[in-house]
Image (tube, grey):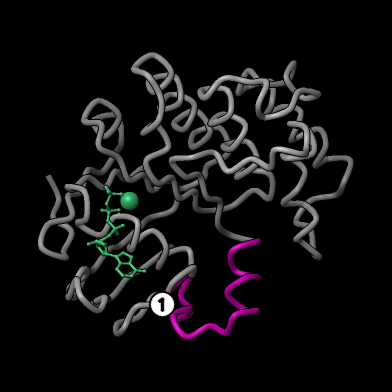
């Protein structure tokens, strides 16, 4: 589904971060990417999500090259195909949980599913994630673990084919981190979305079908 061919990326001062990196992703896979701080995990996730461009190399999504997409093509690709979850939930403080979750719908012109079906789907997501009862609260009124589950539901609103999760459990305690990891896997199974997860947690990485390490700018499998 996603094929990353020999991408390289360097930053001034830092030098080469990704060095002719290759990655093949099959639909429905769960992949963990581990590596020390600064090894380039976020850089890679940003490139896959077209938030950043590689200096060289190519990226194919469902057979077509996407590496040279324009800004608007990249935005359309993201809205239709990619869900993001970050270390910090990035919920908007002045919107309640329900409004935060429905936000990504505003960005999609051509919805893949009808509105009524979509509302049912989102309610189901919220129930599964155990956050349905929080829908009228504001982000400051819920816990960190709850906020991460809200961020996950928000990332899934447009039924992305790929979920990019960049250290989604980094700010959580062990118990919340474990339940977040389980929820990610449940969503992968239930909605057959491909999961690419950058993590420092060996426990969570061990639950993924493919375990990769980012070393010297390249991915090596365990
Ligand atoms: N926009 C940028 N400009 C300059 N340097 C950058 C930029 N983004 C990342 N870097 C550098 O590239 C390297 C890789 O950063 P990246 O954030 O991808 O690492 P990471 O593996 O995600 O680390 P962490 O585990 O701490 O999140 C770091 O040395 C970082 O300082
Ligand atoms: Mg990072």
For the C terminus, which image quadrant? top left
Image spot of residue 166 (x, y percent): 40, 46
51, 179: nearer the viewer? 51
Inspect the magenta stretch and tell me whether residue 75 lies in it: yes
Q: Does residue 113 appear left or right of residue 212 in this picture? A: right
The number of numbered badges drawn on the structure is 1
Question: Label 1 CB, ligand 1: below 8 Å?
Answer: no
145, 59: nearer the viewer? 145
Inspect the magenta stretch and tell me whether residue 139 lies in it: no
Q: Which residues are magenta?
A: 60-79
Write down the quadrant of residue 178 in the picture.
top left
Image spot of residue 14 (x, y percent): 19, 71
| Residue identified by numbered label 1 | 53
Q: Is residue 216 above or below residue 113?
A: below
At 46% from the left and 75% from the top, the residue drawn is 63
Crowding at dot 1, Cα within 10 Å, few <14 / some 14-19 / many 20+, comes out as many
Image spot of residue 145 (x, y percent): 51, 23
For the N terminus, which image quadrant? bottom left
Q: Is residue 124 above or below residue 1?
A: above
At 68% from the left and 44% from the top, the residue drawn is 157
Q: Is residue 136 above or below residue 10?
A: above
Image spot of residue 40 (x, y percent): 25, 59
At 38% from the left and 55% from the top, the residue drawn is 26
Q: Does residue 61 appear left or right of residue 202 in this picture? A: right
114, 20: nearer the viewer? 20
Write down the quadrant of residue 16 in the picture.
bottom left
Given the current orientation, which residue lies at the most extreme right position?
116
At 19% from the left and 75% from the top, the residue drawn is 20
Q: Secondary structure at mark 1?
A: loop
Q: Does residue 30 appear left or right of residue 117 in this picture? A: left
Q: Does residue 155 appear left or right of residue 44 in this picture? A: right
């Amino acid at each position: 589904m996603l094929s990353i061919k020999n991408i390289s990326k360097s930053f001034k001062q830092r030098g080469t971060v990704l060095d002719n990196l290759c990655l093949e992703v099959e639909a429905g896979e769960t992949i963990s990417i581990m590596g020390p701080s600064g090894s380039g995990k976020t850089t890679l996730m940003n490139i896959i999500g077209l938030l950043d461009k590689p200096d060289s190399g190519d990226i194919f999504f469902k057979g077509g090259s996407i590496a040279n997409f324009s800004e608007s093509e990249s935005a359309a690709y993201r809205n239709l195909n990619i869900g993001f979850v970050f270390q910090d939930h990035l919920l908007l403080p002045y919107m309640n949980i329900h409004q935060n979750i429905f936000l990504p719908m505003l960005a999609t012109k051509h919805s893949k599913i009808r509105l009524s079906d979509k509302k049912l789907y989102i309610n189901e997501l919220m129930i599964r994630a155990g956050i349905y009862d929080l829908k009228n609260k504001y982000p400051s009124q819920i816990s960190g673990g709850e906020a991460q589950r809200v961020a996950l539901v928000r990332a899934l609103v447009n039924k992305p084919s790929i979920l990019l999760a960049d250290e989604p459990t980094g700010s959580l305690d062990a118990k919340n981190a474990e339940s977040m990891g389980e929820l990610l896997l449940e969503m992968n199974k239930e909605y057959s979305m491909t999961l690419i997860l950058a993590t420092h947690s060996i426990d969570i990485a061990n639950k993924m079908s493919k375990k990769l390490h980012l070393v010297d700018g390249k991915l090596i499998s365990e």
